[in-house]
Image (tube, helix red, strand yellow):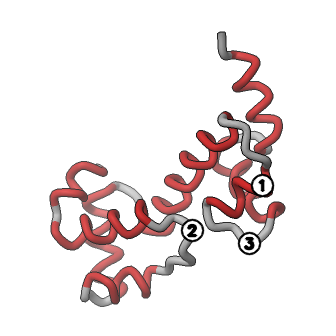
Amino acid sequence: GWLAGLRDPIVGRALSALHGEPRTAWTVETLARLVGLSRSVFAERFTEMVGHPPMQYLTLWRMQLASRLLVDGGSVAEVATAVGYESEPAFSRAFKKVVGRAPGAWRKVRLESLP
């Protein structure tokens, strides 16, 4: 998935952009323009190489970053901003949808399970 995408010159550029600037308000259109493809061709190629559509991948990447920041002690508001959400409630809804718990509740359970 992800490694195959990195090897592809087009998808690799998009992945580098997403990873380098997760706070950016990316769209399929802006990513497609960045790599010089139409939206549909880009989305299809990305999905085929990575295993997720571009915006779903971005959400998963942001939640992975958010999880680390939450464990490191960032407030929910700080983490929301750091991973590209304009509001704490929007971030909390997205986090809960992907991870299964609200950010604060997830952090509490996660920290309780650490030695």
Q: Residue at x 35, y 55 (%)?
A: 51
Instruction: Decide: few, some or many residues near mark 2? Use Cα within 10 Å; few <14, some 14-19, many ≥20.
Output: some
Is residue 104 found left or right of 61 in the rendered image? right
* Amino acid type, residue under disc 2 in the picture: Arg
User: Marks 3 and 1: in contact by CB < 8 Å?
Assistant: no
73 or 113, nearer to the observer: 73
Under circle 2, the secondary element is: loop
The residue at which mark 2 appears reads as: 23
Cα distance, mark 1 to mark 3? 11 Å
Q: In which quarter of the image is residue 41?
A: bottom left
Q: In which quarter of the image is the C terminus?
A: top right
Mark toward the start of the polypeptide (2 vs 1): 2
Mark toward the start of the polypeptide (2 vs 3): 2
Q: Residue 86 carries which label?
A: 3
Q: Is residue 42 above or below residue 61?
A: below
Q: Residue at x 30, y 78 (%)?
A: 42
Q: Which residue is drawn at 27% across and 82% down?
A: 35
Badge nearest the viewer, 1 or 3: 3
Under circle 3, the secondary element is: loop
Cα distance, mark 2 to mark 3? 10 Å
Is residue 109 found left or right of 57 in the rendered image? right
* Amino acid type, residue under disc 3 in the picture: Glu
Cα distance, mark 2 to mark 1? 16 Å
Q: Residue 92 carries which label?
A: 1
- x%, y% of residue 15? 34, 64
Badge nearest the viewer, 2 or 1: 2
- x%, y% of residue 38? 30, 90
* Amino acid type, residue under disc 1 in the picture: Ser
Instruction: Decide: few, some or many residues near mark 3? Use Cα within 10 Å; few <14, some 14-19, many ≥20.
Output: some
Q: Residue 28 carries which label?
A: none
